[in-house]
Image: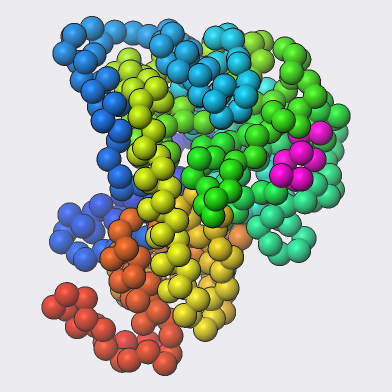
Amino acid sequence: MTLSLIARTIGESVTLKLNETAAILRAKGDPVIHLGGGEPKGKPPMDAILSAAALLNSGEVRYTPADGIPALKQAIIRYTEEFYGRSPAPENVLASGGAKQAIMVCLQAILNPQDEVIFPAPYWVSYPEMVKLVGAVPVPVTPEDGSFIPRIQDIEQVLSSYTRAVIINSPNNPSGAVYPESFIADVVELCERRGLYLIMDDIYHRLIFDGRTPVNCYEYAKDHTESSRLVVINGISKQYAMTGFRIGWAVANSTLIEAMTNIQGHQTSGPSALLQHAAVGAINGIQSSVNSLRMTLENNRNVLMDRLRSFNGVRVQEPGGTFYSFADFSAYEKDSVKLANFLLEKVQVVTVPGRDFGMDGHLRISYCGSIKDITEGIERMKWALDPDAPNELYIGDRKLVRDWT
């Protein structure tokens, strides 16, 4: 069988594959603990459910405009006013089937083959593959100081005549790092000065801990006209625990939004009417669920940090947001894929290899599940890796005996 060049170069989503693996093991009755997921366990807001139910009861579930229903665009405008202090016009807003689609159609609208897109490492697993899907070149940048916090010098060092865009994701998946205000200001200034698109992936911007507030990229932009190349991406999946609803959005200049709308119209048409109405309910409704989720995640983070720091060989930087940590396990095993497979096989704990995020030797460990999953999962991992741990471990009624060194 002959496949296209793109098809031969694109790998599967490791995070989605791990979700599938965990589901299969659980269906078999195995006591698997999933510490690799990116899915908050809270319930969607009741306002979202009621809004979707009202549309279902009406029976009027029809096609929608390719860029989103007016009610959702108005909700996104209100959201942008509240959290960014900007009032975009409806023609500056595109609703998509998740933030991932919003990023994808943006890349399709701005990139030509061989164009380059810069993003800091560690990075979300889909960024390189999405760039390659349009024939462009991903350019990951690893901070020289070994931290998860990029500096503007790191970005400037890889700029070339082919550079077309920069993607910034803060708080960051997988590290949970919150980039400093000074860096955001510098990257906004750099992109304006060099005429580059700046794609701000703000999907976690309300899930920030320790009393901090999200950095508003618009505060540092000098160009607020229709020639601005600043694109802000967001969605309902993370902050409202509505991952399965698949609604995201982009705010950008009207020319770009029109092009993105045309592309999306031929790809998928407009997002589901039912799910858009649910998104309207979430955005316009009572926001207590977001605050509750954030407090739960902050507490879970603290528990996870205490457990990880009990490992002699693990180095971990405390996440400032999201629901991920990115711990360095290279003292035990430098091959993160091998290590993740070992933990799954020996103690049935699912983690995500750091290699897929641009840093081998690390594991992404999620804390969006229960405290019980976090504590028991880390206990199993420590037993599997720590040579000084007891020789036996019980998982329920099942006794495990360490048969490796």
* Residue 337, percent from left and from top: 48, 64
Q: Is residue 120 visible?
A: yes
- Front residue of this view, candidates 80 and 20: 80
Q: Is residue 334 visible?
A: no
Residue for point 27% across, 20% down: 51
Q: Is residue 47 above or below residue 398?
A: above
Q: Going by the image, does 185 lie left or right of 263?
A: right
User: Is residue 265 a member of the stretch shown in magenta?
Assistant: no
Residue for point 43% across, 8% down: 70
- Front residue of this view, candidates 7 and 227: 227
Main SS, magenta residues: helix
The colour scheme used to paint the residues is rainbow
Q: Going by the image, does 265 lie left or right of 117?
A: left
Q: How many marks?
A: 0
In the figure, residue 253 lies in which quadrant?
Answer: top right
Which residues fall within the magenta stretch? 181-189
* Residue 222, percent from left and from top: 80, 24
Q: Going by the image, does 29 lie left or right of 175?
A: left
**Quadrant in which the C terminus is drawn:** bottom left
* Residue 159, percent from left and from top: 83, 41
Residue for point 61% across, 60% down: 359
**Quadrant in which the N terminus is drawn:** top left
* Residue 236, percent from left and from top: 42, 32
User: Is residue 185 a member of the stretch shown in magenta?
Assistant: yes
Q: Is residue 322 above or below residue 326?
A: above
In the figure, residue 396 lies in which quadrant?
Answer: bottom left
